[in-house]
Image (spheres, helix red, strand yellow):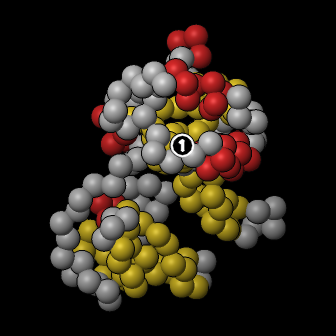
Amino acid sequence: MVVKDDKPKWYVLHTNSGYENVAKQNLEMVVAKNNLQDRVFEIVSPEEEVIQTKDNGKQVVVKQKLFPTYLLVKMIYGDDIWHTITRTRGITGFAGPKGRPLELTEKEIQTMRLETQKVDTSLKVTDSVEIIGGPFDKVTGTVIEIDPQLAKAKVNVEMFGRTTPLDVALDQIRKIG
């Protein structure tokens, strides 16, 4: 086994178009089958919630891929694992020079919110908050649940004439009032 580094890093995998979820499931099965849980820690297909207007004029919230045809994987890389991952059905290779992995920089990891940041907050359930950033920028709501480990909160917002719960990162909301 040739391990490049013993610290897990984030890498980008290229997948077949439209098969990100299938490739992710296949890779998860390969990791389990080959007992690679100590080398591959997270496999992510980043999505965001966006508002779309249907043909009948009705607006709905849908999940949309942030990086179509790509998966992000946190792992301890080695030449031995390269073959296992690139031979996984649905994965066409690593994104990098000549198909070799190129680790993401700290700035890229922070921008994509891949690592949970420790957020010191005094938020409590029932607090009124405003969402800052993202597709729901400037939308206000009420906190109904807080998950400090994932650094997320569930916020009830008034949307389309009814109350809708949204999962929001703690660093994307601020307390008001």
Compared with 106, 151 (above or below) is: below
- Looking at the rendered structure, the kind of residue marked 1 is Leu
- Residue 154 in the image: above or below residue 77: below
Is residue 128 visible to the viewer in this orientation of the structure?
yes
Name the quarter where the C terminus is drawn: bottom left
Q: Secondary structure at mark 1?
A: loop
Q: Is residue 72 left or right of residue 30?
A: left
Give the x, y percent position of residue 10: 43, 36
> Dot 1 surroundings within 10 Å: few (below 14), some, or many (20 or more)?
some
The residue drawn where x is 63% and y is 58% is: 63
Question: Measured from the top left, where is residue 80 in percent x and y?
Answer: 55, 24
Question: At 50% from the left edge and 42% from the top edge, which residue is drawn?
Answer: 40
**In percent of the image, x 46 and y 81: which residue is there?**
156
Q: Residue furthest front?
A: 1
Residue sitting at the far top: 98
Question: As drawn, which residue projects farthest toward the bottom?
Answer: 126
Q: Is residue 167 left or right of residue 31?
A: left
- 164 or 122, which lies in front? 122
Q: Quadrant of residue 132?
A: bottom left
135 is higher (above) or lower (below) than 3: below
Say left or right for 129 vs 157: left
Q: Picture quarter containing residue 70?
A: top right
Pick whichever, 140 or 102, lies toward us.
102
Residue 13 lies, in percent from the top left, at 58, 31
Asked if residue 140 shows in the view, the reply is: no
User: In the rendered view, does 76 fall on the left or right side of 92?
Assistant: left
Which residue is found at the position 59% from the left and 83% from the top? 161
Q: Nearer the viewer, residue 8 or 94?
A: 8
Look at mark 1 in the image and give the residue it sits on: 36
Q: Quadrant location of residue 67?
A: top right
